[in-house]
Image: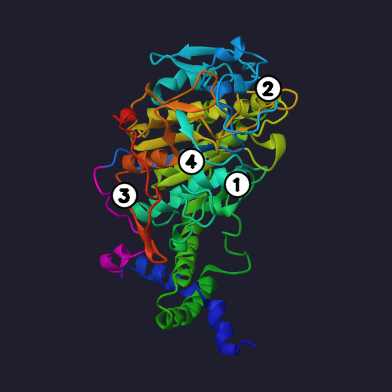
Amino acid sequence: MLSRRDLLTQAGCGFGSLALTTMLSEQGLLASSARASSTLASKQPHFAARAKNVIFLFMYGGPSHVDLFDYKPALEKYAGKSVGDHVDTKGSRSNGGLFPSPYKFQQHGQSGHWVSDRYPHLSRVIDHTAMLRGVYGHSISHAPALFEVNTGMIRTGFPSLGSWVNYGLGTENQDLPGFVVMYDYRGGPIGGAPNWGAGFLPGAYQGTPVRSKGTPILNLNRPDQVGQVQQRELLDFAGKMNRNHQRNHPAESALEARIQSFELAYRMQAAAPGSLDLEDETDATKKLYGIEKGNPGEYFGTQCLMARRLVERGVRFVQLYSGGGHGDNNWDAHGNITGNHNKHCAATDQPMAGLIQDLDQRGLLDETLVVWGGEFGRTPHKQGGSGRDHHPFGFTMWMAGGGIKGGTSYGETDEVGYHAAVDRTSIHDVHATILHLMGIDHERLTYRFSGRDFRLTDVAGDVIHKVIV
């Protein structure tokens, strides 16, 4: 049974230093050196950064590369033929013939990027993008594939990309998280929080979830029955116990993470509502993102506009999820590629184009890296009636903004879009490139855990210099 002392110690853990820190900061009594020692204090990059922030547009479920950005006329030529007659499938499942895209493709912009007719708005800003058409992963299942794109590893328990960026650079705004995640209103991705977790890094670097529908951040506001003075007194009292506990257990990183999280939550009570409230945005801006009642892009457009507001305010890494839950609520088009992708393309087309346009108009695109992708692509052959299966062997991602040479492309899949064939691009290569654009050398960003130095890119990864300005 817990003693009264133990109970009070545990109950107070995390709250008090938040109040003390906040009050001293408001009174100007905190030394700059003390503020700089904060876990989340802004840090210098290894070299001059091309981008200050990242917005990662994650299409959960697996968007089809051969129906969106990787035009394959050979699928029409060989329609219905066995995929094994044209490529070595290496024993992977293939239970249907080659399946031409039901969509029309056209080249757009000065770059001549091929884009499906499902993305009419995005095609108008396509010259800002660099296409990575030879990406490959290592898992055919959602959860490990999600972990790989998010953490570099197919196993759970490793720090996410956003956490590594947060660890390497800190946050520019101490009143907001350095890493924010907005998942789909229909539910989060398979695997849940480990997709944006800190793994073995200190917990303060994990992503902070924000909702695009309803109250953005749950349990943030002070209860009505608790006044501000009362809250400060409570937190100050708890802080004395909290600091005593920390002095007796200096090696407990979880305790430090809790302290940091409650300090941040207290500051966010004032800063977060204004950052996420779209009321002061003009009708023209909302329309640009597709935020209109009845518009299929209303919810993802809200996420994209929130993301712009967050990076404006110094949030380093924002990840948005399109698609949630299971079945056709995400991009996992096993039975009907047309029905599934019609819906999800309509929900994301105008918001993504609006985001790029808005960032560009405000002078933010040069310092904001926009990344698009899913956990894998989809098979060039048919599954079920008119669907496509999971496909990690070759698929497309793209980047725009912060240091990217717009209008370029890198990598190719084979004739039918099965394997990454030319300039094959691993997820480690993608991560190394993102870190490089943020001013981080992926080989130098390490964290010692369990007797060895770990990296986001493990022992691999090459920066894709051909798509960088």
Gap in Å between the C-alphas at discs 3 and 4?
29 Å
- Cα distance in 3D space between marks 3 and 2: 42 Å
The first of marks 3 and 2 along the sequence is: 2
**Vertical relation: 317 (above or below) 11:** above
Element at badge 4? helix
Residue at disc 2, secondary structure: helix
Question: Residue 359 location, x and y as percent?
Answer: 41, 32
Residue nearest the observer in this picture, 355 or 457 = 457
In this view of the protein, can residue 67 be seen by the observer? Answer: yes
Q: Which mark is residue 443?
A: 3
Q: Farthest residue to the top: give it.
A: 77
Give coordinates of residue 155: x percent, y percent: 54, 52
Is residue 402 depicted above or below 71 in this figure? Answer: below
Asked if residue 97 lies left or right of residue 374, the reply is right
Circle number at residue 338: 2
- Is label 2 in contact with label 4 (beta carbons under 8 Å)? no
Residue at image location 58% in from the left, 49% down from the top: 216
Q: Is residue 97 left or right of residue 391?
A: right
Q: CA distance from mark 2 to mark 4?
A: 29 Å
Q: State yes or no: discs 3 and 4 in contact (Cβ < 8 Å).
A: no
- Going by the image, does 439 lie left or right of 382? left
Q: In the drawing, what numbered circle is on residue 96? A: none
The answer to which of marks 4 and 1 sits earlier in the sequence is 1
**Crowding at label 3, few (<14), some or many (≥20) Cα neighbours within 10 Å?**
some
Question: Secondary structure beneath disc 3?
Answer: loop
Magenta residues, start to end = 30-48
Mark 4, Cα crowd under 10 Å, few <14 / some 14-19 / many 20+, is many
Of labels 3 and 4, the one closer to you: 3
Apparent side of residue 402 relative to residue 211 in the rendered image (left or right): left
Depth-wise, is mark 1 or mark 2 nearer the camera? 1
- In the rendered image, which residue does mark 1 sit on? 143
